[in-house]
Image: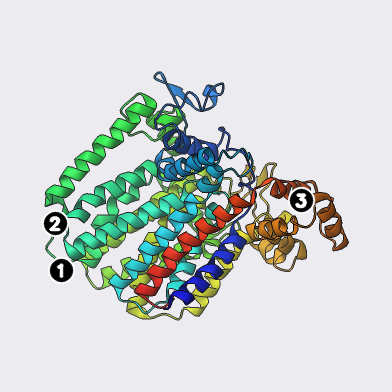
Amino acid sequence: MTMKNKFIITFLLTLVALFFLKTDYRMIETIYPGADDGDHYLHATTIGIDFDLDYTNQLKGVEDIRYDGNGKIAPTAFIGSGFLSSPFVAFGNLLNSITNNEQEIFNFVILFYSLSGYFYLILTLAICLSLKSFFKLNLSNLVICILILSSGVSYFVFERYSMTHIFEIFTTSLVIFTSFKFFEKREKKFAALIPLAVLLGILVKWTNYYLFIIPISIKLIYFTEKRVKLRNNIYFLLSTALSIFIFFLHTKILYGVFTINPGTSYEEDAVDIIDKYVLANFNLINEITSFGKSILIILFSSEFGLTWFSTINSIGFMMLFFFIIRSVYKKEIEKFIGYSCFFIGYLSIFYIIHLWESTASSYGFRYSFCLTPISLIIFFDFYKKFKINLKVVILLCLFSIGGTLFFETDPLTQLSLEPALNSWGQYNTYSQKNYLSGYLLSLISFTSYQIIIVTSFLFVYFIKFLLFFLNSEKLLFQFSKFGLPSDNEDFINLIQNIEKISLISLIVFFVLIFSINYYLINLSSKNNKI
């Protein structure tokens, strides 16, 4: 591919990214503590700006709303995603200092921090494109990107960026990549990197225990003939010891105690958590039946069922079940164990959703998004063996991606602010039992398309261009002639905020996205056709 073509494709991809990137959580001065978004931002700022793990200045006056015990105060959310995004905060803070930037809304810290998830999405795509070469598949890179984006994670990249989900997917893909590389090449560096990748994933979310079984499953499924044992590798053992040391050291620094209890930051005892959510009124037969029903809800319900709104994970789960049955039929014991380990990983995530009996107060069954890289390699394996027709899969994936675009563009695609009946028959806030039908109706709603366009960053650049010729008041008056919501308070605030944003901020934003995209296009052109 010529340099000119690379730049053209990168430019077009940047325009697509700007269309998907939303203003809702970006037109702000800072992210305040009190919810998960704020907790992850606190981790990123204390590492990236203060260069310490002392949260007293960030939580001054609100210590009681986060972890406060053993003489320590800290965010309740885990540190991993904050650690990964802290370089972006550091660079944004440096630019603020160098340029004496006094802009409050969409300052350089927020600007760079809001793109950290996009950066790790592109890294994840790059890792997954490289995994394709192991399976020797004739799949276009575009198809692989569509498969990954169909997970639903794009909402937590392009809109609600200060959440863990893309970081979970990135670290999972990293564990898979390092495992494949070690068993394929037997290189010492990958033996050392596997425990560190697992550590990074656990720091992002302590309860993602499936990370520990990924190397085992990959060895048993894809490298049954190679006599290489990871457990006997000295570099692996030393790296494992180092990873364990780092994990316990960070719990002591943050929470004042050595612990593996994920409830520590919430000041809950592990035994109490198990007793409350699992053992209370426990009956094995009823629990199995109930869990089975929950799996069907997770896969097929109109309230963000994975088949419709996280297609790759639904396909991955069903293909994995097929492989387990197939390995039993063909008496492939090692593969059966490997596939079963992966299956247990899926069930562990599904069981958490089952215990909560909700979608976790946001878009989709977001706790399951972390399984995306595993689902992808299962799909690769299945496609290599059976060469399925991709048309239906791609259509479902595109439908799933559209679900993130149309989220909250219509009353039927909005989560309830009052307790409402969900798919489990529970009354919860932030539920939307009929999201599938609401999404289908929003596809023919002109208002939905208006909201999608107006809340995109592509619209921000369009408005900024017009503001060179008209002030915000005159612009709103002109918009009123075209039937746009010029009297809507949110729309007025958006126009006024865009007026406040400096041109240099928007140029930096565009250049950063363009640079990230160019890396992907350059890598893609080397590996395979786009």
Residue 302 drawn at (x, y percent): 61, 60
Q: Could you tell me which residue is drawn at 20 percent across and 54 percent down?
A: 189
Residue closest to the far top: 71
Mark 3 or 2: in front is 3
In-front residue for pair 446/50: 50
Cα distance in 3D space between marks 1 and 2: 12 Å
Residue found at x 56% / y 58%? 510
Look at the numbered discs 1 and 2 and tell me whether their residues touch, using CB distance below 8 Å.
no
Query: Which residue is located at x 25 percent, y 38 percent?
Result: 244
Residue 321: tell me if it is visible.
no
Measure the C-alpha gap from mark 3 to mark 1: 62 Å
Q: Is residue 422 above or below residue 522?
A: above
Secondary structure beneath disc 1? Answer: loop
Q: Nearer the viewer, residue 356 or 16?
A: 16
Label 3, label 2: how far apart the Cα atoms are: 60 Å
Q: Nearer the viewer, mark 3 or mark 1?
A: 3
* Amino acid, disc 2: Lys
Pointer 1 residue? 225
What residue is shown with label 2?
Answer: 229
Q: Amino acid at mark 1?
A: Glu
Percent coordinates x, y for residue 220 in the rendering? 22, 62
Q: Name the disc covering residue 491, or none.
A: 3
Image coloring type: rainbow
459 or 284, which is in the foreground? 459
